Amino acid sequence: MEQALDKGLKAVQARFTGGLSPIALAAAYSDWALHLSSAPGKQLELVEKAIKKVTRFANYTALCAQNPETDETCITPLPQDRRFKDEAWQKWPFNAMSQAFLLNQQWWHNATTGVEGVTEQHENVVEFAARQILDVFSPSNFPLTNPQVLAQTYSQGGMNLVRGWQNFIEDAARMNAGKKPVGAEAFEVGRNLATAKGKVVYRNRLIELIQYAPTTDTVRPEPILIVPAWIMKYYILDLSEQNSLVRYLTSQGFTVFMVSWKNPDAEDRDLGMEDYRSLGIMDAVDAIDAITDGQQIHALGYCLGGTLLSIAAATMAREKDDRLKTLTLLAAQVDFTEAGELTQFINDSQLTYLEDMMWDKGYLDTKQMSGAFQLLRSNDLIWSRVIHDYLMGERSEMIDLMAWNSDATRMPYRMHSEYLRRLFLKNDLAEGRYQVTDRPIAISDIRAPVFMVGTERDHVAPWHSVYKFNLLSDTDVTFVLTSGGHNAGIVSEPGHPRRHYRMRTRTKDEPYTDPDRWVDETGAVDGSWWPALTEWLAEKSGALTKPPQMGAKVKGYAPLCDAPGSYVFQE
C-alpha cells in the first residue's frame, strides 16, 4: 500500500510536469549553482564577458544609428538557427533585438557550461533548460518584435492574427479530443499510405508479419526481413508509392517481409525486451525460414528495431544460428554513451519518476513520447509552428511523413523501463553485460556483414553514436552517412532533391578510423543511398530464381488477411 501511494503520487505529479522529474531537475540546478557560487574565478569571467558583450552591443547600436542600412553584425547565429535569416531582421530596430537576444543566449551558454566540478549530465541539463527558457522569449515569437509578422499584419489588416487564433482553437480542440493534426485526414493507411500489396502470414500477441507480393518475375533467393521501431507505426518504410522502401526493394528483385508491431495497452504492461526479441524477431525469422524453405535472411532494422535486431543477431551468433545472411542497421545504436540530448533525461531519479508514471497506466502514453522529441528540437518543432500557424496565420501543407509522425504508439511499462535502464543508463549491450536467457551476449560475436546508415542531422540517434558499432564489431562493416535527419534521411528515395551520402567499407582486419576523419576521407556522392543498399544486398545474394509462395499453409503460415493487416490500425 505504501509503495502504491508513492507511485500514485508521482504519477499525478507527472501529469503537470510533462513526465520530467522535478527532483532530477533540482539536483542538476543545485549542482550547477553550488559549484558556481564557490567559483569566484568563473564569476569574474562571466562579469567580464557581460561587460564585453554590453560594449559590443553598444558599439553595434551606435553603428546602426549612423548607418541604419549596415549589414554588419556583432554576433552570428549558429548554422542551425534559422529564426533571423530573413532580410527584415537586418533592419533597425529588429537587428538590434535579434543581436541582443543572441548575445544574451551566448552569455547564458557560458554561464551554464565550464563550471568546474559539475557533472557532465547536470551541466547538459542546466544548459538545455536555460536554452529552452531563452527560446520562449526570442523576439521572433512575439508579433510586435517580429518584422515578418508585423509586415503580414499590416498587409492583411490583421486577418493573419484572426486566422492564427482560429488555427490555435482548432489545434487545441483536436488535441483535447485526441484527434490527429489538421490535414492528416487526407492520408489514410491502406488508401494512400502503406499500400504495397501483400499478405499477413503470421500473427501473435505482439506482431503481424507481412509478406509483400513480388513485382518482378524473378527474385533473389534470400528474403529481406524489416524490423521497424515500435515507437511509431511500421509504414514509415512503406509511405506513399513514390517513397516506399518496400516497393523499391521489391522492384529490385527482393522478397520482403515486414514486422508490424501491436500498439500495446494496459494488458501488455509486463511485456519486456526479451518478449520483443522472441515474439517479434525470432518468431518472424522462424516464419520466414518455413516459407522460404530455409533460405538465409537479409535482416534490416530501423532505429530501436535495429538495436533489437543487433541483440537478436548477437544471440543467434552465440547459439550458432546462422540464418542471418547480412545485417542492415538504419539509424540504430548499440552503444549509448553519446546518444544525443535524450541522455540528459536518463538517470536513476528521472527513470524512477518515469517508471512510476508508467506504473499508473501500464504504458508510456504517446503524448509523453512526442513531447520529449519536440523538446529536443523546440525551435523547429514548436516555436516555428507557433510563428507560422498562429502569428502568420498560415497552415503548412500536410505530407505523408508528417501524417505518419502523428500516428504514434504506446510503450509497455516493463519494456520501456528495461530499454532505458539496461541500454541508455547502464550501456549493458556495449559493455558485455546485456543478458539473454541468463547469459551475456556480445556484438563482437556477429559475423554477418553489416550495412549501417547514419544521418547527418539526427537528433534521436546521432551518427557519431551509430558509428560506434565499428568499435564493437568483428565483421565487415559498410558505413553510410546520408544527408537529412532521423526520418527524412532514411526515407530518401531515388530522385529526391538535395540528397547526398558518403559510403565506405571497413573489413574486419582493417584498423579503426575515427568518425571525423572518416568524413574527411570519404567523398560525398549526390543522390539517394537506396541504390547503394540494393547493390550491396545483391552482391551478398544468390542467383535470381522464382519468387516463393505467399505464406506456407501446410507449415502453419497460411495468409490471414491482406496487407497492411490489423495491428497498424490500432489507436
Image: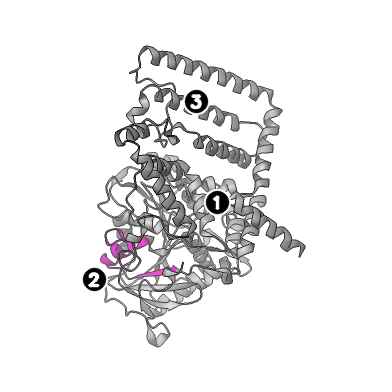
The disc at residue 103 is 3
For marks 2 and 1, the one nearer the N-term is 2
SS under mark 2: loop
The disc at residue 392 is none
Residue picked out by circle 1 = 336
Residue picked out by circle 2 = 216
Left or right, 503 with reference to 465: left
Report the residue at 36% width, 61% height from top. Answer: 237
Report the residue at 37% width, 11% height from top. Answer: 66
In the image shown, does 161 or 285 lie closer to the viewer? 161
Report x, y in % for residue 279: 51, 73
For marks 3 and 2, the one nearer the N-term is 3
For marks 3 and 1, the one nearer the N-term is 3
Give the label, 3 or 2, closer to the camera: 3
SS under mark 1: loop
In the image shown, does 242 or 364 lie closer to the viewer? 364
Q: Is residue 338 above or below residue 287?
A: above
Q: Tell me if residue 347 can be seen.
A: yes
Placement of the N terminus among the 4 image quadrants: bottom right
**In this view, which residue lies farthest toward the left?**
217
Q: Amino acid at mark 2?
A: Thr
Q: Amino acid at mark 3?
A: Leu
